[in-house]
Image: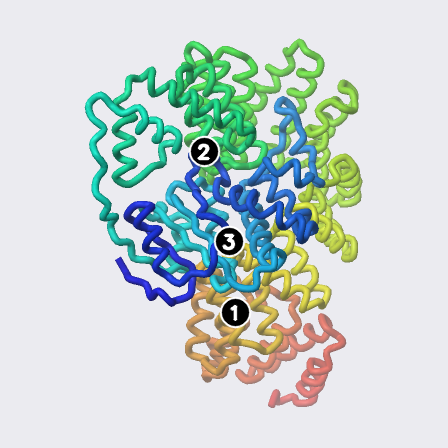
Amino acid sequence: MQQADPTAPGHLRCHGGTRRSRAAAVGARRLPPGLLEPVDAHRRLRGPYTAAGTVARALVPAVLAADPELVRRHDIELLSVAPELADLVPNSRETLTSMALPAERTRFYARLRTRRIAGGLVEFVRDALPALGHDGPRCLLVENVEHAEATDREFLAALLRRVDADVLTVVLCGAHAPDPGGVLASVLEHRTTEVAVRPDDSAPAADAGDGGDEEQARRWVEADGLLDGPDGEAARRAYRSLPDADRAALHDRRAARLREAEEFSLALGALPYHLERGSDPVAEAVPALWTASDHCLVNGFYDAVVDYGRRGQRLVDGRQDSGRWWRFGVQLGLALSILGRTKEAEAVYDEARLLSTDPAVHMACAYSTAMLYTRHNDPADRDEKKAKALLNGAIATASLLQDRVERAFQSAFYRNGRALVEVNLGDPQEALRLVTECIEDLDERLTPDEHRLHRSVLKNNRARVYAGLGRLDDALADYAVVIEQDPNHAEHYLERGNLFRRLGRTGEALADYSRALSLSPPFPEIYYNRGDLRLNEGDVDGALADFGYVIEQDPEFVDAYINRCAIHLEAGDPAAALADARAGLRVDPDNAHLHAAVGQALTESGEPGEAEAAYDRAVAADPDLVSALSGRAGVRYEAGRLQDALADLCRAVELAPKDPALRYNRAFLHQEAGHRQEALDDLELAAVLDPEDAETAEALAALRGRPDGA
């Protein structure tokens, strides 16, 4: 293993050996003082955000005393990763989604929500350091990173990427590296230095003996099965040598002590782990796994929902108890769908149909499978007609329900799903009819407090259909109602801001974007939209700030690179534009806009040969990209290849016939080629398209005055 310079700055990774040998290797380096005691990231301890929650619980009390506004600004992130903080950190931004009863949930958080939480939490940790009065760098050591849950991997990756090591040196340790290909593994490779680990030379522990050693086994269970090294191996052997009943009793006692701690996050990790191995896993672990799954579904921790769902179904015999099996199955299938694991999701629904004759299960499976075919599947695997057929079956079954409220809700729910299919089939008018019918039926049949979330979802969906039909005032009217009913849901303001922008109501659009940002963890899409609007309004500095923040949060947000490239080129800074274009191309190597930006930057830097090659790549990626064609025409003209340049400009004008600049430039080339009439035609049209352009008027007058076209 590579031996790192003990004085070199930077984040560190330390893999291999045992916890003791890793601690010795890290301890030999000159690291800043520890921000906290070493943090264990193993998901068995507290499930999602095991490491992030530990950091939050340790920092919040002191930060709250020093800078309460910093805590308030990140309350969503802090309460998401450490629900135990609810007594200290009030949640001031509840939404209908977060407050909905399980039976009334019809909207769930986007898959990217955990990335936004990670980004906000990183900013909290970064800003907490000066708030706590630290006058120099600190160090954060995290163990067992290879066993971190997906949410913690996102958090640790963002921490490594966004916080400089001279502010907070992050040291990530584990017996082996995280699985390759994941977000954390990639950042570790590029943002950390490897620390050499010497094998632990401690003498092997004595064998526990054939009869076992109850004290050793107890140590294993009390450590939640996370001991390593020779002593840990001895404890594990002792544990395995005990009779089943004795092992189960140890787990029961550990579970009882965990419950006494009254820390909810333990119910996401260690508690269900021990109950699964206790004396009555079906009676004790199944409800615990359900509680964990339900909490994670509400919060958008979908990888964890899959884990709990699989574990719960292993304990429940679906042939004997299909109801409890499906209770996990409905959440498992939804989580798999949102994660894009649609084949696995469909397998869950198919198995549910085999196990159950309950009409409610078959309705739910029909709807969920339809959503695979109209929304979640890859485009090549979608089938709108199959989705519509499935939904029609669910609608028919729902009409037979006896309960008034349930019949009204389920019928509206499935018709709303069919409205999405109608949009995808190209019939927005039918979608509008269906959604309006749903809204009217629920208003007539339910009291105002019944199914508030779904009624809000319906109006939001109708607003989207109105927007697609160009009925923007009707859409705004629905958004006004939705925002009044659910004022803390950021996406409503984002969508309404986009409508205001379409209507040219810039001030209201900016206000809605800013309001959305105040209600959510860092949300790159909203910053991008606001930056794009600021750029169009001439606020270049504001646009640069927004695009820069988007890239800081999400280095794979290609459109932000494209827009920032344009700003740099307009400002006469080809070096900065080239750096952004190449960074974007590392994410999207075939992006035609970025290749064209490289071409323009290289042209302005005096490298025409490389510029033409970049334009060639842009045109190969998108033969209809006007900026690439016109840029390449300029390079070819300067190289003396008039006909090639003219061919590019002719194609560009064909694609954008009302662009006066293209007409003017082609007229120039036509003159060079001796095509007087063609040049005259282009200049005359350019003058009509842009009558205020003096250069075009002057060129037109000159050409008219020279019959020979000289």
Q: Secondary structure at mark 3?
A: loop
The three-letter code of the residue at mark 3 reads Leu
Which of disc 2 and disc 1 is earlier in sequence? 2
- The residue lying toward the viewer, choosing from 188 and 125, is 125
- Percent x, y of residue 286: 47, 19
Residue at 46 percent across and 24 percent down: it is 255
| Mark drawn on residue 342 | 2
Quadrant, the C terminus: bottom right
In the picture provided, is 546 more to the left or to the right than 370? right
Residue 137 in sight: yes
Q: Quadrant of residue 347?
A: top left
Tell me, yes or no, if residue 517 can be seen here: no
For the N terminus, the quadrant is bottom left
Relative horizontal placement of residue 496, taking residue 221 as reference (left or right): right
Mark toward the start of the polypeptide (2 vs 3): 3
User: What kind of residue is marked 2?
Assistant: Thr
Which of the two marks, 1 or 3, is nearer to us in this view?
A: 3
Residue that appears at 43% across and 48% down: 142
Q: Nearer the viewer, residue 241 or 149?
A: 241
The percent coordinates of residue 27 (x first, y second) are 36, 56
Residue count near mark 1 (Cα–Cα under 10 Å), binned few <14, some 14–19, many ≥20:
many
Real-space CA distance between mark 2 and mark 3, rounded to the nearest whole angstrom: 42 Å
The amino acid pointed to by label 1 is: Ala
| Secondary-structure class at tag 1 | helix
Looking at the rendered image, the disc whose residue lies closer to the viewer, 1 or 2, is 2
Circle 1 residue: 597
The residue labelled by disc 3 is: 35
Q: Is residue 210 left or right of residue 214?
A: left
Residue drawn at x 49%, y 70% is: 579
